[in-house]
Image: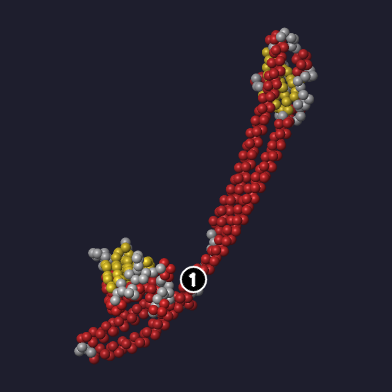
Amino acid sequence: MLVAATDVERVGLFPWEPQVDVRKGRLRGRSLALAMAASVAAVAVLAYWDAARESTAALEDFAEEQRTIAAALGAALLARSELGAPIDAPVVLKELRSVERQRSLAIFVHRPGEDSLRSTDGGRLSSARLLEAIERGDAVLRIPREEAAAFGLPARTALAGLSRVDAGASGTWDVVAIATAQRERDRQLSARRRLMLSVFLASGLVLAFGGAAMRMQRSELVLERELAVQDVRQLRDERLERATRAAAMGALAMGVAHEISTPLGVIAGRAEQMSPRVAGDERLSGDVTAILSQVDRINQVIRGLLGLARGDAPLAERIDPRELARNALGLVEHRFGKAGVRLRQELAEGDDLPVVNGDPRLLEQAVVNLLLNACDACKDGGEVVLELRREVAELEIAVEDSGTGISPASASRAAEPLYTTKGREGGTGLGLAIAHEIVASHGGRLAFTAVAPRGTRAVIVVPAAEGAAHA
């Protein structure tokens, strides 16, 4: 729609501000943060799992050592019995005492039916946990740190190896070897410290790289915003330029209409005065009638263009596409004959052209503008074809010429007011812009494409009337 310069602000041409999609940046930032947290958690979990596995394996190996010691002591007692050497409590305790290590390894024996354990120094010690393990026939038992001191060991977790020896006449003996796991626990603590240090180092590296990535991302977002602002400013400048041209075109159209109305009135008045005088001459009378008819047509076109400039809706008459094409061709035939350009019409076969609603004079003017532009493009002769056909629920009016062709840049700007490639050859840059506005006011669209090997194809597409029959 053509607008005046004072209407730019009123129609809200620039009611928006530059927008940057920050959601994408936030999503990337959150994803990066989650990836960093997941990496740190994975490192910690894997390190903890590895340390726990190593700790469990170390304790199992240490427990196996105590079971082996108890079994070896039992085997020694059995060998003594088989050799006929006496086995009684003082003798057994004395021999086992040499195996003990101060605050590291303690040896105890037990006879079935007794409710306590005998230490190598002859004392007795009651431990429900050990007695129950002996009754169950366990080979290894874990002693909590709070009970380890009762066996003369440091207050650390201890492991007991159990072995039962059947000494024949000397009866059955249970040998218990209890050793502290202090060294293994100290190693575990050292391993955990190394684990924490490794986790901290890995986390620091992850956070450092993640921080660098987030800073880079922030810089990218700032750059994206600057580019978006620059694009918006460029688009705003282009829209402002187009609005200025449209306003100039509207003002020009109003001025031209005002200036043309006076001479048209004079022409119409003189033609009406001549009409009775030439009534007897059929040829002159026809010429006067044609003058009055064209003056009336010019007035109607001017009123229609002024209505477009004011934003009024066009008329909604039912238009026969064939009649529309016929009238448009009749208006430009003399121009094509003078330029030596062939003009040909192609209609869809059969009765397959839909009726459309609109202002017939304005649509005729749009087609005329396209035909005249095509004629001007064929400088050294050539051919222009006007085609009409149905496209689903739309009417397509195409004007194709064999002229100089059109570039993609010109095709995108062809409908801009005051844009022309004719230079000093007489182009005003208004014909195609007016055609574009007329088509747009009828709910249609106008497009330009290049044709191989040379030439241009301009296509008007307007919607068919609701419930329209074929023309």
Could you say where residue 216 lies in the image, as x and y percent from the top left?
60, 56
For the N terminus, the image quarter is bottom left
Q: In the displayed structure, would residue 199 be above or below residue 72?
A: below
Q: Quadrant of residue 250?
A: bottom left
The quadrant the C terminus occupies is bottom left
The residue that appears at 58% across and 58% down in the rendered structure is 220
In the image: residue 52, left or right of residue 146: left
Report the residue marked by disc 1. 238
Residue 419 or residue 470, whichever sits in front: 419
Q: Residue furthest front?
A: 380
Tell me where residue 83 sits by quadrant. top right
User: Residue 444: percent from the left, percent from the top?
Assistant: 37, 68
Res. 305 visible in picture: yes
Q: Is residue 174 visible?
A: no
The residue under the point 57% across, 51% down is: 31
Compared to 316, does 197 lie above or below?
above
